[in-house]
Amino acid sequence: DQQVKQNSPSLSVQEGRISILNCDYTNSMFDYFLWYKKYPAEGPTFLISISSIKDKNEDGRFTVFLNKSAKHLSLHIVPSQPGDSAVYFCAAVHGGTYKYIFGTGTRLKVLA
Amino acid sequence: DVKVTQSSRYLVKRTGEKVFLECVQDMDHENMFWYRQDPGLGLRLIYFSYDVKMKEKGDIPEGYSVSREKKERFSLILESASTNQTSMYLCASSPYSNQPQHFGDGTRLSIL
């Protein structure tokens, strides 16, 4: 039973346009969410996070939106750059636990 | 910057061997984690540790054990390696539960 789902395995976007990566979850006890970026042959790198008490968090070109009623999380990258090409994982945490539940990842390709 | 170092980038072992994967972090983090990453399955938690000599099973602990004798070091042990344990293994650390985990660059393990 997959509690965190990334339904799009891949996404291609033109340089300068917006990239939107989506993530759905089923467990309403999750209260902290994160996005990681992973390049080939490297470990995942933390990008941005959001607590369930917020619905939006921004950091430069990256914005994460949380819709608790829909149990939906999205990452917006504006403007997209070729260096953003990577696999993006969302993760969810049940409050007070140490366990991250990861999605299966979305491979983003930004075309120059 | 947090540094999580995994002892090997690539490792080839034979079925039935006992395999040790080592991980060291330099930020005095309380928590350390071992994941495996497989195509289409995302990152799955094998074991984690929230203190020296403490360990907890993750989602897929079968066939693995761990050791944490010092705060900075967390070892993953494959007691008797099997071909279905061929995977990318990722180590991570975090200061406490609702803080981002920092990952090493991974060990690609092949069991022949």
Image: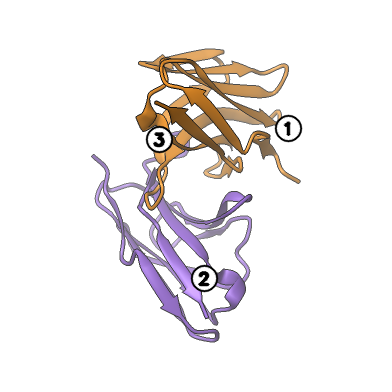
Label 1 marks which chain's residue?
Answer: A
Q: Residue at x 67, y 18 (%)?
A: A68
Query: Dot 3 corresponds to which residue?
Result: A46
Label 2 marks which chain's residue?
Answer: B
Most distant residue in the front direction: A112
Identified by mark 3, the residue type is Phe
Nearest-to-viewer mark from 2 and 1: 1
Which tint was used for chain A? Answer: orange
Residue A54 drawn at (x, y percent): 54, 14
Using a 10 Å C-alpha cutoff, classify the residue at mark 3 as few (fewer than 14 neighbours), some (14 to 19) or many (20 or more): some
Can the viewer see residue B40 in this picture?
yes
Nearest-to-viewer mark from 3 and 2: 3
Callout count: 3
Is circle 2 on the same chain as circle 1? Answer: no
Q: Is residue B20 left or right of residue B111?
A: left
Query: Dot 2 corresponds to which residue?
Result: B65
Could you tell me which secondary element the residue under label 2 belongs to? strand
Give the chain letter for purple.
Answer: B
Q: From the viewer's side, name the closer residue of A1 and B52.
A: A1
Distance of label 2 from label 1 (alpha carbons): 30 Å
Upstream in sequence: badge 3 or badge 1: 1
Could you tell me which secondary element the residue under label 3 belongs to? strand
Query: Dot 1 corresponds to which residue?
Result: A26
Q: Residue at x 63, y 51 (%)?
A: B41
Distance of label 3 from label 1 (alpha carbons): 22 Å
Relative height, residue A102 to residue B41 (above, below): above
Label 3 marks which chain's residue?
Answer: A
Q: From the viewer's side, name the closer residue of B108 and A54.
A: B108
Labels 3 & 1 near each other (Cβ < 8 A): no
Is circle 3 on the same chain as circle 1? Answer: yes
Identified by mark 1, the residue type is Thr
Labels 3 & 2 near each other (Cβ < 8 A): no
